[in-house]
Amino acid sequence: MKKIYFDCFSGISGDMIIGAFLDAGFSFSILEQELDRLNISGYNISHEKCTKNNISASKFSVNVTDDQPHRRLSEIIEIINKSGLNDKVKDNAVSIFKLIGNAEAYIHNIDIESVHFHEIGGMDSIIDICGAAVCFHELGIAEIVSSPLNTGSGTVNTSHGILPVPAPATAEILKGIPVYSGNISGELTTPTGAAIIKHYCQNFSNLPDLKIASIGYGAGTKDFSIPNLLRIFIGDCTEDYAAYDEAMEIETSVDDMNTEYFSYLFDLLTAEGALDISVIPAVMKKNRPGHIIKVLAHKEKSDRVAEILFRETTTSGLRIRSVKRKILERFFITVKTKYGEIRVKVHNLDKMPTTISPEYEDCKRAAVEHEVPLKHVYNEAIIEAQGLF
């Protein structure tokens, strides 16, 4: 099972995250190809090798070529949802932007749709957040761990004036995350970096047991007395631990709910990071037909999942329990077929492929483009993937 550790000794930002992934070996051409699916113009991306305090790293940059408007959250979500990105990538990117939007709305005591996403809503942040979501998805990382975050100290210049570090919105996002200020004057952890790591990270600790496969250094823009770098370790868990993790199962039963609401409920729960959702027909008390709703989520997401279930269903109570999951190692490959390139998810058991699953969105796009049945594209992708093993 693939695992990643974020060493945030000099804070974290969106461009540092992508730079670290690229430095660890993630393909820049795949990143560029996926971001093209956003269907927006007025920018280009680049990366280059650099050094920070004599340590080699990769610097990722978004170069804005045209004037960009200050966008509201709904406008950003519309751009993402209308894009050709993978659905999971879209969901993760939207959730990250909602974290930032909710923090800004709370700090300024306004409705979230009244928030103008100044520097955090610029083109660079859209690319940073969607680019990070692409990297996480393509690498198929099963577990994400981070060190406590170095926020920096002093003040920072923003569109709202001079603010303390961490900036109020950043501090709001960082609730529940271990942080420290260190002795560096300046903003080390940005709202974008804080939101990305909060969305993805399951726990915060020192470097865990890990069989390291690659290390990446993502460079920040400024120079400090310490290297302005984000370091990531990517590898495999130890054999005994690799197959297991823990999650929370949130369950409820309803017998008076309009079933048309389930689709909307699923969308909300998925956007909040639910690992699995199921609805099971059941016979309730007084012989009424009803449904059992089960949601699986990481511990830090369970309160939010419970809030959604209370708000969006007719339930008056939930059953919550900790469960252990046994998970197959999983990763993505891209195969070339006569219908074009198709991404395929591979599940390993004892280091051997046990399930090969072509990505639906890629297959759907190829089927439409070539005017062939969807199952033909699926079968072709599976045959090409099996040939690699």
Image: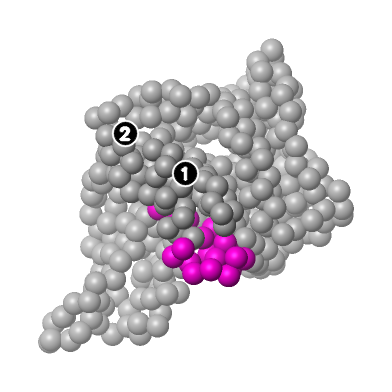
Q: Nearer the viewer, residue 59 or 351?
A: 351
Q: Position of residue 366 (x, y in %)?
A: 57, 61
Marks 2 and 1: CB-CB under 8 Å?
Answer: no
Furthest-top residue in this view: 54
Where 113 sits versus 66, above or below? below
Residue at position x 69%, y 12% in the image: 54
What's under tag 1, amino acid-wise?
A: Phe
Residue holding disc 2: 351
Side of 334 where 46 appears, left or right? right
Task: Write down the region rendered in magenta.
Answer: 357-376
Side of 22 where 372 appears, left or right? left
Q: CA distance from mark 2 to mark 1?
A: 14 Å
In which quadrant will I find the N terminus? Answer: top left
In which quadrant will I find the C terminus? Answer: top left
**How would you rate the neighbour count of disc 2 (Cα within 10 Å): few for under 14, some for 14-19, many for 20 or more?**
few
Where 248 sits versus 25, above or below? below
Identify the element where label 1 is drawn: strand
